[in-house]
């Protein structure tokens, strides 16, 4: 049985899985229904069966109470996605069923086990969302090698398969539920992220909502309906709105048949009306794009190419506004598949590095294999993949950590007192280059009062790039308490280190310089929105009793 590693684009509306085949080509694996993408919809058919994909999407019309869609918009934001059979299920648990469907179908088609994966997320996702994405993979029983940003994955595929020469490329990524704009330097087997911006609440679903509202208004005017659409009619309306939007890609006008409360009506939707009512949404993407270009230009980079990624970039209005605004004819790169293909390339490279690292550790005696956790981790990387990255032309035989250089996507601050007033002191600034896949910043502070017994280290995550900003608890990421001897004077030195890895996971270290006491913490989300390791394991164990199809 051939050993493959996989890249998964876990999308808001559609998901996709890919691998690198023996010829070195990134290839999407179709699902059992024969399509390259799978709707990110889960229907709980009964307590032991979760149905995922197109069937679940269609079932939503007749069983909306037991169906979940757009779950990605809840990742890291909420610990509740649906109540089914008297149990509250988290977004991570629901997402794990989508991942299981992708993995099971790919495994069956390729006659192999789908175990080792890289999962993508929007560049604009912060620590909580990235952690939630990784947890979803672990609940699904997968070994999540890394979480990487969607535009980085798309650019990696572009760099390996399409790009010629060195250039600055803007990746405009408009998916079903998120928008990202990332500017990168691509060429000579190198990809360096310069900066990114975006909105993880803006995506094709918002265009669907505008169409729904229009269709509903027109239907009511035509039939005299009072506008009180029940849950079933709402689901039907959403499906027909999405279909009408897709049809307008190739047509100037489409008819839509609607039914509600025994009434039937025919509504026409033209592309010109569609463009007009969604112009404000499109403008929001351009504002973010302008902001990213400004940052890139401040660093001395001028955009040479614009790359369109994400299913929603198929809308003609996107290409039109890009040409009108920037005077660049954008390149369209397999909008539905580029992210998964790039993730597959990255996954293979990252897996190779892990295999070599563990081989070296074991041969040198650096690790204690009698430790159960260490042994479990080592066993994940004992078998070489069926194909090497050497087979991928665009990599020129380079290691993945030599190819991709990312940048910070958020700023991370520590709450401190400045002239007696609480402020957030930015330790790590957004859009800073991360050499060797991480960035570490150390600063020294002092205790606020004499005889403090603890120092509370509160961490904030934001988009602010100033040295200090006003404290806002909406940006609170987490906190840790450092024990102190209790007899220190005010201003006793405390050293704080923030270390951010390329997955967007933040590690905090606090040291009382007088006593030498230390505290180490991995920052998680507040308000109980991130699952603990114990919760993840419990969900994984329970999930084994649920059939996914």
Image (spheres, rainbow, N blue to C red):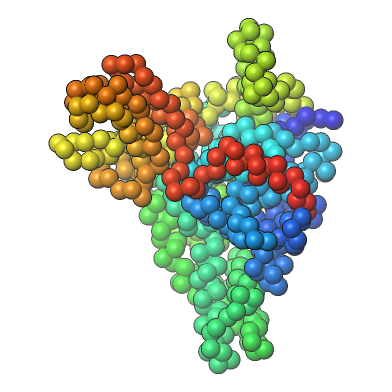
In the rendered image, the residue lying farthest to the bottom is 224
Looking at the figure, which quarter contains the C terminus?
Answer: bottom right
Number of numbered discs overlaid on the protein picture: 0
Image vertical order of residue 74 relative to residue 127, above or below: below
Image vertical order of residue 296 relative to residue 248, above or below: above
* Picture coordinates of residue 172, whole percent (x, y): 49, 49
- Seen in the image, is 435 located left or right of residue 3? left
- Seen in the image, is 449 located left or right of residue 340? left
Looking at the figure, which quarter contains the N terminus?
Answer: top right
Foreground of the two, 130 or 373: 373
In the rendered image, the residue lying farthest to the top is 364
Image vertical order of residue 292 relative to residue 440, above or below: below
Q: Can residue 314 be seen in this view?
A: no
Q: In which quarter of the image is residue 251?
A: bottom right
Foreground of the two, 468 or 291: 468
Q: Residue at x 82, y 44 (%)?
A: 109
Q: Is residue 229 visible?
A: yes
Image vertical order of residue 509 relative to residue 302, above or below: above
* Picture coordinates of residue 68, whole percent (x, y): 63, 61
Q: Quadrant of residue 363?
A: top right
Q: Which residue is drawn at 51% across and 44% down?
A: 530
* Picture coordinates of residue 366, whole percent (x, y): 60, 10
Q: Residue at x 36, y 50 (%)?
A: 474
* Picture coordinates of residue 298, whole percent (x, y): 31, 38
């Amino acid at each position: 049985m051939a050993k493959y590693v996989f890249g998964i684009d876990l999308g808001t509306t559609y998901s996709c899985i890919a691998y690198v085949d023996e010829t070195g080509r990134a290839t999407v694996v179709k699902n059992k229904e024969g399509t390259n993408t799978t709707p990110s919809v889960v229907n709980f058919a009964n307590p032991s069966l979760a149905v995922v994909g197109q069937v679940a999407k269609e079932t939503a019309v007749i069983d909306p109470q037991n169906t979940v869609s757009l779950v990605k918009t809840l990742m890291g934001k909420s610990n509740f996605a649906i109540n089914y059979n008297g149990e509250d299920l988290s977004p991570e648990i629901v997402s794990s069923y989508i991942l299981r469907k992708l993995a099971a179908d790919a495994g069956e088609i390729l006659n192999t086990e789908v175990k080792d994966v890289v999962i993508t997320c929007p560049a604009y996702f912060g620590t909580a969302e990235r952690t939630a994405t990784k947890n979803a993979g672990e609940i699904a029983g997968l070994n999540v090698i890394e979480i990487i940003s969607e535009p980085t994955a798309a650019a990696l595929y572009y760099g390996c398969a399409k790009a010629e020469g060195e250039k600055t490329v803007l990746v405009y990524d408009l998916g079903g539920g998120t928008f990202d704009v990332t500017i990168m330097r691509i060429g000579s087997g190198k990809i360096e992220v310069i900066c990114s911006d975006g909105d993880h609440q803006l995506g094709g679903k918002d265009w669907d909502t505008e169409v729904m509202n229009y269709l509903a208004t027109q239907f009511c005017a035509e039939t005299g309906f009072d506008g009180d659409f029940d849950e079933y009619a709402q689901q039907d309306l959403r499906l027909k709105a999405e279909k009408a939007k897709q049809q307008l890609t190739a047509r100037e006008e489409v008819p839509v048949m609607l039914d509600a409360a025994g009434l039937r009506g025919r509504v026409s939707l033209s592309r010109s009306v569609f463009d007009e009512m969604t112009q404000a949404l499109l403008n929001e993407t351009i504002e973010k794009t302008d902001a990213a270009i400004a940052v890139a230009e401040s660093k001395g980079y001028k955009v040479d190419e614009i790359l369109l990624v994400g299913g929603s970039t198929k809308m003609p209005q996107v290409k039109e506004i890009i040409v009108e605004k920037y005077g660049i004819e954008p390149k369209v790169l397999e909008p539905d598949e580029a992210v998964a293909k790039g993730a597959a390339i990255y996954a293979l490279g990252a897996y190779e590095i892990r295999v070599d690292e563990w081989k070296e550790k074991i041969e040198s005696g650096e690790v204690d294999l009698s430790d159960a956790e260490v042994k479990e981790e080592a066993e994940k990387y004992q078998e070489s993949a069926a194909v090497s990255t050497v087979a991928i032309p665009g990599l020129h035989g380079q290691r993945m950590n030599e190819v991709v250089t990312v940048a910070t996507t958020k700023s991370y601050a520590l709450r401190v007192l400045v002239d007696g007033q609480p402020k957030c002191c930015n330790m790590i600034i957004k859009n800073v280059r991360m050499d060797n896949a991480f960035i570490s910043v150390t600063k020294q502070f002092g205790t606020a009062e004499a005889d403090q017994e603890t120092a509370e280290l509160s961490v904030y995550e934001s988009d602010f790039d100033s040295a200090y900003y006003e404290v806002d608890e909406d940006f609170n990421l987490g906190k840790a308490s450092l024990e102190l001897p209790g007899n220190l004077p005010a201003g006793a030195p405390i050293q704080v280190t923030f270390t951010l890895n390329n997955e967007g996971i933040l590690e905090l270290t606090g040291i009382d310089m007088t006593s030498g006491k230390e505290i180490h913490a991995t920052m998680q989300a507040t308000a109980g929105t991130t699952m603990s390791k114990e919760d993840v394991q419990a969900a994984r164990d329970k999930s084994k009793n649920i059939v996914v199809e």
